[in-house]
Amino acid sequence: MSKKIVSRSALYYLLCITSLLFISKLAISVDNEIIYSGPGDNKDGYESRDYVTKSLSINERKGEKTNLIKYAEQSQLGLPKLKIPKNNPITEKKIALGKKLFFDRRISLNNTMSCAMCHIPEQGFTNNEIRTAVGIEGRSNLRNAPTIINSAYYKFLFHDAREYSLENQVWQPVLKHSEMGMPSFGFTVKKLELIPGYKNLFNDAFPGEGINVATFSKAIASYERSLISANSNFDKWYFGKNDKAVSAEVKKGFEVFIGKGNCVSCHSIDNDHALFFDNKLHNTGVGYADSMGLLIKNNKTVVQLAPGEYVEVDNNIIKSVNQQKKKNDLGLYDITENPDHRWMFKTPSLRNISLTSPYMHNGVFSSLDDVINFYNDGGVQNELLSPKIKKLNLSKAEKINLKLFLESLVGENINILIADALFQTVGDLTKDDPNWANDKDMGYNK
Ligand code: HEC
Ligand code: HEC
């Protein structure tokens, strides 16, 4: 191996470690049993040389099954009744099948990548550890993985709003080269047919239809539709009229949200519910700043090699080892080609926001404090900046209260949804397993 290659692979290693620097962990309890919200690979205290791992192995992360259909069918305080498409009525069998598929790594070309590996349940159904998603064989993606929770309420999906239904959305990650890398619809269906067990599950969930392009996505969409979470402390106070559900600071933070901060003009609240999004796209300046390289202030990145051991790496060196040249992300413009749509991105919901860092379409902010400071500065100036974004002049106390308000938006059933997900087998299959499909010749030699 030449010297050059050695130093390059060392740098890849550094890059992987850099991604692990986004760590927020929170212990939570369900019926007095502790489960973990936050990366399973817990690195709390990693900055010190005395670090001892607290990470949990997959076998230690046992969950608890829940009948999820109630979350799709019954309203929770704070959210309107969910509309279920007429051509995909929700059933328990579809949810169970969709959940199995969501966690099954065999849906990817090389059997390594499931939906749940980017939308990680205990990390708010997103990935707290990396800014932009990494797919099979370490392939980089342009954008941050959004949470799946409450995604059933969006009129548009993806940061640039290029999809309109959960059913249609499903196939993009499956077929995308940098996500799950499957070569075609037909190959995916064929592979599922060859994995023992799926035929019966599909026939039961979709009588007379079996495994096909539509039933695959209908099953996964049904699981996603059951991941609804509201009835937060904020909802109990604001919609439930329980004065004690939140602190005085949260109430003050809410005043900032609807008043001086003007957040509510895009993160909407209605009379009897609050989605915290407006089904629109806006230019806040994040995308512009990314295109112009304005948000990265330092030209060096601090990389931690081992507990207590740091080095500084020049960003140009990091850039030089990136396999894919980063594409300029123009948001809605890439879909409509209307120059006025440059750097417009979809307004995301703020429910469960404290669980879903890092933030924005490119994951540029790792904390809510960073997001609040960004808005306080009036976003980033550009010719297409939304007129709703202005300098806010918030006091220190107003910023703290605003953050406390945002933290009050964690849904009551969130631990139940995580525990239910942890109950699912993750597709950690070996070749001895009768369910292993990799060695099948997929019919080509017959
Ligand atoms: C490699 C990581 C990765 C994998 C694997 C992955 N996703 Fe995603 N997901 C993302 C990223 C990144 C986005 C945002 C992409 C964009 O906006 O262009 C996204 C967006 C979504 C959205 C839209 C959410 C919203 O708020 O608009 C849904 C729903 C979703 N994914 C579901 C799935 C399902 C179902 C699977 C499995 C079939 C899956 N994802 C697999 C990374 C991933
Ligand atoms: C002009 C409309 C608009 C206003 C006003 C606005 N936002 Fe946003 N917000 C957005 C959009 C659009 C995004 C997504 C930007 C992106 O992905 O680059 C966003 C993203 C966020 C995020 C990150 C969400 C995530 O999942 O990544 C948070 C947190 C947030 N806003 C909070 C606030 C707060 C707090 C205020 C008030 C101080 C506010 N917003 C004002 C439109 C707005």
Image (cartoon, helix red, strand yellow):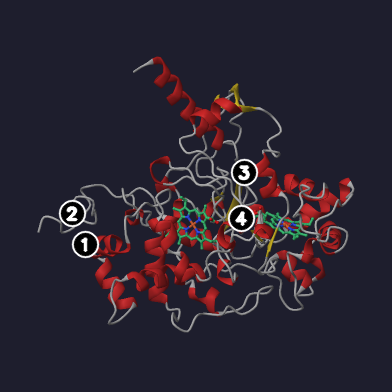
Mark 2 or 3 closer to N-term?
A: 3
Q: Amino acid at mark 4?
A: Gly
Describe the element under mark 2 as helix, strand or loop.
loop
Image quadrant holding the N terminus, namely top left
| Residue 63 appearing in the image | no
Image quadrant of ligand 2? bottom right
Graded by Cα atoms within 10 Å as few (under 14), some (14 to 19) or many (20 or more), the crowding at tag 4 reads: many
Q: Are marks 3 and 4 in contact (CB under 8 Å)?
A: no
Disc 1 from disc 3: Cα separation = 40 Å
Q: Which residue is mark 3?
A: 24
Q: Can you tell which of label 4 and label 2 is closer to the viewer?
A: 4
Q: Amino acid at mark 1?
A: Leu
**In this view of the protein, which residue sits in the foreground, 200 or 8?**
8
Describe the element under mark 3 as helix, strand or loop.
loop
Mark 4 or 2 closer to N-term?
A: 4
Q: Which residue is mark 1?
A: 194
